[in-house]
Every structure is written in structure tokens, then in C-alpha cells.
Image: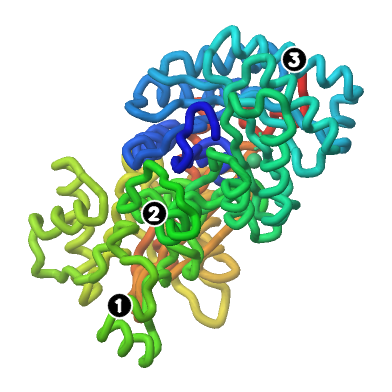
Amino acid sequence: MTKTASKDRVVIFDTTLRDGEQSPGATMTHDEKLEIAGLLDEMGVDIIEAGFPIASEGDFAAVSEIAKNSVNSVICGLARANFADIDRCWEAVKHAEKPRIHTFIGTSPLHRAIPNLTMDEMAERIEQTVTHARNLCDNVQWSPMDATRTEWDYLARVVEIAIKCGATTINIPDTVGYTAPIESADLIRRLIAEVPGAETVVFATHCHNDLGMATANSLAAVAGGARQIECTINGLGERAGNTALEEVVMALKVRGDIMPFETGIDTTKLMHISRRVATVSGFNVQFNKAIVGKNAFAHESGIHQDGMLKNAETFEIMRPQDVGLSGTSLPLGKHSGRAALRAKLNELGFEPGDNQLKDIFVRFKELADRKKEVYDDDLIALMGVSEAEENDRLKVVAMKVLCGTGPAESTIEMEIDGADVTASSEGDGPVDATFKAIRKLHPNKAHLQLYQVHAVTEGTDAQATVSVRLEEDGVIATGQSADTDTVVASAKAYVSALNRLLVRREKTGPGADVREINYKDVD
Ligand code: KIV
Ligand code: ZN
């Protein structure tokens, strides 16, 4: 039994905006972070880890603003084991109704070697920093990073120190995704049984997915006594990612018979938040991803379809409605009106204002003219594009591409800061020619890190969603766009990424990106 969580309640700690956003290329803008935090709060996430306040001015501003806007969730910030980090974190989270400081240090032999601290020196550092955090805030989480590769005796010793110094939650991270379910359960069980004072705190589990076991390891930790699961939407996170929120939450809901725990999550909001995180991070969800993948509730084969028609439970262990799908996907067409469009968007979780609806209606009509049926996924893609294009300095106005057996040639007309400009370029294929023409109009040193195309729906008239990730002087930005013409979608995605680079440079200045902070340093 733990102090703040009752026996059957598992607290959900979402770190999409910290661990998730930290994964290369997943950086979000200030407004996007605010939007995602609002959705997490509304969905019933107990604790939102909103960022790493000392990492950059941008991170600090986002955590402060999220803290100010929080409604129900505890707002947490991350801090390394030093006073400057902890003070900066407190400055950002203190605006929340319910603030939390999360401080950590790497305790395994490999991680101890980085700051070159002896076991005793590190123990002393933990004592000082947890005490300092607790003097500022009465809700303090402490993590021994790489706990699953830390010697048992040392782990038990430092956990005891953190508890004595006032930590209220002890998080046990499997930083490199090394543990396995049996070990994960045993570790938490043993800590609770053997560390003095363990009964006064909540134990948390924080798993990475390097061996594909993050969800299983988190659930096993709960079986061992953990009552807080740390996770991210779509499993976003460093390397292979973190535990996926939607997976642990639905596993606990569907298999309550063998895992008698509940969460406070409104699962009908899962699909919408998954789509928004995919759009703003530029990390598409794989089609066969559990719970939120495009195919998670699709039945293709004749036998499966026949079974489904007779009784949905034949092949479904949860209802599509439980995760926020309508169950049926009735397409709109070119005769559908504005009211039908608004109703459909509301059903999909969007609440466009009148101006945005006007804009999206025009785009919808253009698309419906080119495509017989406009599906839910088409509308989601349009919404993503519409939101991304607001306030952009660079805009694609028109383009013409010639391609065939020789080099491709692209001519593009753009509006840049209100001025109309045109350029042409040859290239190795239509996309290369187009990107070169754009670079003529807006010279930049941005390096293309990722170029990805997905068909949104089926058929040769399907919309293509294109994601482009750019890197310039250590600053990373992602752009997405959708169009029935793949080259047009590519141009718009590239331009959208350039717009984001401009915004990021203006807001944070060069060198302010979180990755320039050495995450493993203690000073
Ligand atoms: O994976 C990890 O160890 C972390 C810590 C900062 C908790 O993300
Ligand atoms: Zn992590």
C-alpha cells in the first residue's frame, strides 16, 4: 500500500512533453505544447511532465504557461541533481495549482562515472538536492537514472536517503529498456519490502522500449507494487520510445479481471490525442500499432469480416468507441455542407472556431472536387495542415512540375513575408527539383534529416501526407502537409518545416535547443 494512491488506483504520469519531445526531431512549438498539455489534462492524466525548464528559455516558458493553465493535473518539471536546475524548475512549476519537482541522477556504475563521483559523494549529492527540492515544494519525485543496472545495495541505500530527505514519489527508471517483466516486478517488490520508509511513498515505473517490453515491464512493476506509470502518447520517446500511455491504460481497462487497477483516463479521448501528437511531432503512428494504429480496428479478411458482422466480439476485445473511434467511417462528399463538416470534425475531437471552419470548408470542397469521397483521415490531415499554416511567413502559392525521362524541372511561386516571388530549378526527380527551387527563393543551410510519404486513404486519388524534418545549427523542425498530389504535399511540408525553423530561431535563438544541455551532467 502507498500513501497517496489507493490500492486499486494507478496514477498516470505523462512525459510526452519531456521525454517524448526530447527524442530527435520530435520538438514541438510553444503553442503545440500548450495544446497537448490541455488535451492531457482534459483526458484525466494525473501528472504532466511538461518539460525540462533549465534546458532552454523555450522550455521554461512552456512549463510556466502549462502550469498557469493547468486545471486538474499536477504539473511537473525535470531537474538534474543541482540547485540551479531545481530552482529553475521550481520557478516554472510554482504557478500550477499542484506543482511537482522531479529531480534525478544516474546511479549505475556507468552513469556514476560521468560526473566522476564516488558512491559516497553521490549519496551526499542526493541528500542535498532532494532536501533542497523539498524545501521549495511539498511534492518531490526522485529518480535514480538507470536504476535497473544499479547495484542492488547501492540502489536500496540511495532510495532510502531520498525518502528520508522528503521525496514523495520514488521513480525507478529502466533508462535503457534492459529489464524484463519478472525482474521489473521483483525489483519494485523488493524495494517496497526492504527499504525503510518505503510504505510512505508512491513507487513509479518508467520504462523505455529498446527490447519492445516497455508496456509489459510497466504492468509487471504495477503487479510488484508500483502505483504510478510513466508513459507517453504513441510511445514517443528517446530511441525506441517510452511505454505507450494508450497501451497500459487499455490493458488495465480490458484485463481488469487479472489486473484489478483503475486509472482516471477518459479512454474515449485517446484517438484524438494520438493523432494530434503524431501531427505536431511529425512521428506518424505505425498502421499496426496497438490501440491507436489505423488498422487496430480494421478487419480485412473475409472470415474476419463475416465473424464481425455476426458478433463484433469474435475479433474485437475492446470497442472502437472505447478509444474514441466512431466505429463507422461514413465519408463526406462534395455535396456535404458546412454543418455536416462541423459535426464530423466535432465527432473526430476537433472544435474549430468559425474562421477555421470557413478555411477548412474551402479546403474540404477543393478536395471533394478532386476526390469522390472524403474520409475521416482526409479531414484529420486537412485540420493538421490548416493549423500548421496559420501565421506562416513562407507560403506556397502555385507550382508546375515537368518530369519524365530527363531531369525534372520545377517552377514554384511563393509568398514570402507578403511578397510574391517565383523561381525554377532542375533536379534529380520532381521533389528534389522543387526543394531546390524553394531554396533559391529562401536560401538556407537546413539539412534534410527525414522525408516520409504516407497515403492517407486508399486509391490513386488518395491524399498523401508528407513529413519533412530539417536541422539547422542544432535546431530541428518538422513540417507536414497533405495533398492528392505528392509533390505539392512535399513542397508544402518542406515550407512548413522552414516556417517552424524561423519561429524556433526567433523564440529561442541559436544554441538554445535542449539537446545542447548534457542530460547526464550533474552540474
Ligand atoms: O529514462 C530515464 O531515466 C529518464 C529519467 C530522467 C527519469 O527519463
Ligand atoms: Zn526516460
**Quarter of the rendering occupied by the N terminus:** top right
> Which x, y percent locates residue 519?
71, 31
**Which residue carries the number 1 mark?**
312
Q: How is the image coloured?
A: rainbow
**Which residue carries the number 2 mark?**
275
Q: Which amino acid type is shown beneath numbered disc 2? A: Arg
Q: Secondary structure at mark 3?
A: helix
Tell which tag, 2 or 3, sits nearer the viewer. Answer: 3
Q: Secondary structure at mark 2?
A: helix
Q: Is residue 494 visible?
A: no
Image position of 330 with respect to 230: above or below: below
Picture residue at 41% right of the left edge, 44% below the top: 263
Depth order, front residue of 82/124:
124
Residue furthest out toward the bottom: 302
Mark 2 or mark 1, which is nearer the start of the sequence?
A: 2
Q: Quadrant of ligand 2?
A: top right
Q: Is residue 192 visible?
A: yes
> Which x, y percent locates residue 433?
53, 63
Tell which tag, 1 or 2, sits nearer the viewer. Answer: 1
Q: Counting other residues with Cα less than 10 Å from the Cα at mark 2, is it few (<14), some (14-19), or many (20 or more)?
A: many
> Which x, y percent locates residue 245?
48, 49
Query: Which mark is drawn over residue 127?
Result: 3
Mark 1 or mark 3, which is nearer the start of the sequence?
A: 3
Q: Counting other residues with Cα less than 10 Å from the Cα at mark 3, is it few (<14), some (14-19), or many (20 or more)?
A: many
Mark 3 or mark 2, which is nearer the start of the sequence?
A: 3
Picture residue at 63% right of the left edge, 46% below the top: 224
Picture residue at 54% right of the left edge, 49% below the top: 439
> Which x, y percent locates residue 105?
74, 27
Q: Which amino acid type is shown beneath numbered disc 3? A: Glu
**Quarter of the rendering occupied by the C terminus:** top right
Q: Counting other residues with Cα less than 10 Å from the Cα at mark 1, is it few (<14), some (14-19), or many (20 or more)?
A: some
Image position of 473 with respect to 420: above or below: above
